[in-house]
Amino acid sequence: MHRSDITQPAHHTKHLPVLAYPLNSVTFHLVQRDDGTSNGTALWLGAQVLSIYLSAEFKGKSRKIIETGTDNNASDLCDTARPKAVELGSGIGLMALALASLGYDVLATDTVHVCASVLRSNINANAYLVPGRVHVRELDWSINPTGWIWDDPVSITSSASLPRRGDDGLDFLAPPFDLIVSSDTIYDMALVAPLFETIHALSALSFPPALSPPSSFSGIEASPTSPPEYPPTQPCKPPVIYLAIERRDPTLITTAFRRASEEWGLSFQRIPEKKLRRAGVGVGWDAGEWEGVEVWRGRWDGVTGAIK
């Protein structure tokens, strides 16, 4: 495969069944399927832009700085063995692998179809290249968080009761998370509420005063009202959120971010385009190739919708 193929924007490479994708000193080999069955089985521009930007933003920083995306406020830091991220709509797995290459443990989530057709196999094939762990799980945004299951190796939100597989000794990735990411997921108004409700729930599960994750994995569904398990001397803010979107429908995007703030207490600010360019976004691409792609950084206010 020629280098001219693999460095092009995603809309020029959808015909390629396998992408050899260089990032953070390694080359990932990612299978994609542009068969019209699902938008999530091929690479999209948002994931490219976000992976490039965060790779530059986090590379070379200390573990504690990475955990919250801050530079010098020690009171904001959570003391974890390794920073943890959760991705919504992982697609072919580029963003999850990019974060894992930076030292994150990543919970990569998507629909049943995407997990089975491309995501799980891509993660398994490239896991040896990265220091962080990546776990793949199905996550249905329409399922109420009180029904989420954190110790199932396949699905967080399976509607059916799946048999346990003798995995009691496995270290499952679960809240609290230090980072939430999602790309190319705001394109349909019907998805706005489920997406932001899921982001809100994950933020609340990762914030001590509001909700706490399960303290053990006993095969019982997690209760979001369990007593907090965090050390009281180590407060932390809700996780940082990064979203990458394509502004195909300006009204939809504007409405989505307004609702995120008003209904779920999720406030976002757009990363300036010049900062994305300094991070390397668009290098080698023709002018206008990523026009309309935006990266937004946000955080839950820690109050709106919190369970008391």
Image: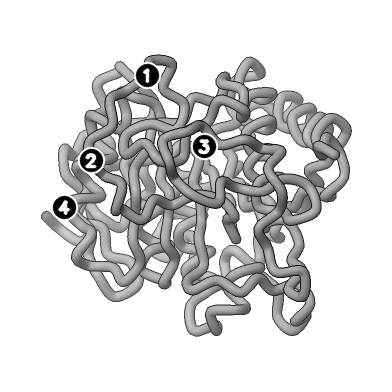
The percent position of residue 259, horizontal first and vertical second, equals 81, 29
Q: Which mark is on residue 184?
A: 3
Going from N to C along the chain, the mark reached first, 1 or 4, is 4
Mark in the foreground, 1 or 4? 1
Q: Amino acid at mark 3?
A: Asp
Q: Could you say which quadrant of the image residue 151 lies in?
A: top left
Q: Which residue is mark 2?
A: 166
Q: Which residue corresponds to the image point at 81% horizontal and 37% vertical from the top-left?
A: 307
Nearer to us: label 4 or label 3 = 4
Q: Residues within 10 Å of mark 2 (few under 14, many from 20)?
A: few
What secondary structure is found at the residue carrying circle 4? Answer: helix
Q: Residues under labels 4 and 2: Cα distance?
A: 24 Å
Q: Is residue 297 visible?
A: no
Which of the 4 image quarters holds residue 211? top right
Secondary structure found at label 3:
loop
* Gap in angstroms between the C-alphas marked 1 and 3: 30 Å
What residue do we see at 36% from left, 36% from top? 152
> Which residue has dot 4 on it?
125
Dot 1 corresponds to which residue? 161
Element type at marker 1?
A: loop
Q: Are marks 4 and 2 in contact (CB under 8 Å)?
A: no
Task: Please name the residue shown 78% across and 35% down the image.
Answer: 260
Q: Residues within 10 Å of mark 4 (few under 14, many from 20)?
A: some
Visible residue check, residue 120? yes
Label 1 and label 4: CA atoms lie apart by 29 Å
Name the N-terminal-most of marks 1 and 3.
1
Q: Secondary structure at mark 2?
A: loop
* Labels 3 & 2 near each other (Cβ < 8 A): no
x and y percent of residue 193 in the render? Answer: 69, 23
